[in-house]
Amino acid sequence: MAVLQRFTRLVTCILCLVQAESFSQNHRAAILTSKITPSLLRESASSVNDVTSPMPPSPYQVSIAYCTGCRWGLRSFWMAQELLTTFENDANLQAVSLLPSSNAGQFTVTCHAGSNEEYVLWDRKEKGSFPEMKELKQLLRDQVEPSRYLGHSDTNVRKVMQEAETTATDATTALSADSAKEAVSVPFLLPTLQNAPFPSISIAYCTGCKWLFRAAWFAQEFLQTFSDDLHSVSLLPARPPTQGGSFQIYVNDVLVWDRAERGEFPDIKTIKQMLRDQLNPTKDLGHLDNNGKQSFDTMDDEDAEEARRMFGVL
């Protein structure tokens, strides 16, 4: 009987030790977990943010090559303005360049990433048709900002994804807004254009002032007047932290007009003359070079008398 009682006590002690060890392990795990979650993770996150800064987004540029013989210039400018309007606040998109081409039937939209990578978004000869604007925006979005939702120009799948990421997007937007408030305005810097062959004209415009349409109008005027002298015209959005009110016109890499310095937009006649002096100094601009006066051939007295007789004026 005594032996049985001692055996029972021994088994009870072993069970108590096992339970105590199990509780100790669970307790230590809970402590470790509580330490990692609220404190260690915050410290790790802050240390990572302090040591490493986020990589800047890769700059993208778009070029639209169109057949001049097919009169597709207006179509190309319309698509360029649509893309620049949709991606107005997307710093990843640096420029949209228009390239007049003598290649019959050409209409090619290309996205350039860096100096070596390019992606053909649309080739009319290959596809057999022009792109729907909705589809072209989606193709460009997939390259520039894959996670972005384009509203009514997008698919239902993207809509669901956007709703799931609303909280994260709001937080990022708030952070970006705070950063924008703290950012210092800087002058506009002309980027290196990947597919804008010289001779070229570049127009930088302030997105906050909504000067895209003004810039596009100037660009169309330049292409029409200097159709034989230009290989490309580029529209460059000047976004924050670039100084507000930017409107600059470049020939190749040379600044020809800066609204901030001159205090006004250029007169179309004046700027065309300035561009002519850079592109083709011997080019005749027609009535733009005549100071608004019509020229008439003069007649001597004999020619005048003969003219009077011819028209019965004595």
Image (cartoon, rainbow, N blue to C red):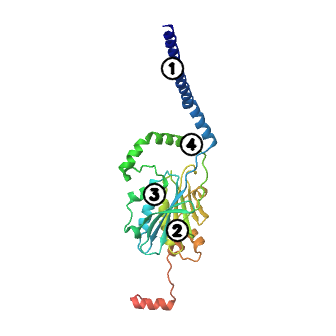
The residue drawn where x is 45% and y is 59% is 81
Residue 167: horizontal and vertical position, in percent? Answer: 45, 39
Q: Nearer the viewer, residue 202 or 79?
A: 79
**Which residue is denoted by mark 2 in the rendering?**
232
Residue 311 lies in quadrant? bottom left
Q: Amino acid at mark 1?
A: Gln
Callout 4 touching callout 3 (CB < 8 Å): no
Distance Cα–Cα, label 4 vs label 1: 54 Å
Real-space Cα separation, disc 3 to disc 1, in angstroms: 62 Å
Task: Give, as a three-letter code, the residue at label 3.
Answer: Leu
Residue depicted at x 47% and y 42%? 169
Above or below for 308 versus 191: below
For the residues labelled 2 and 4, the Cα–Cα distance comes to 35 Å
Amino acid of disc 4:
Ser
Q: Quadrant of residue 37?
A: top right
Residue 133, numbered label = none
Give the mark, 4 or 1, whose residue is nearer the N terminus. Answer: 1
The residue where tag 4 is placed is 179
* Mark 1 secondary-structure assignment: helix
- Write down the residue under mark 3: 140
Which is more N-terminal, label 4 or label 2? 4
Q: Nearer the viewer, mark 3 or mark 2?
A: 3
Q: Which residue is mark 1?
A: 19
Q: Position of residue 132 (x, y in %)?
A: 37, 61
The residue lying toward the viewer, choosing from 128 and 65, is 128
Query: First in sequence: mark 1 or mark 2?
Result: 1
Mark nearest the camera among 3 and 1 is 1
Q: Is residue 295 visible?
A: yes
Q: Amino acid at mark 2?
A: Ser
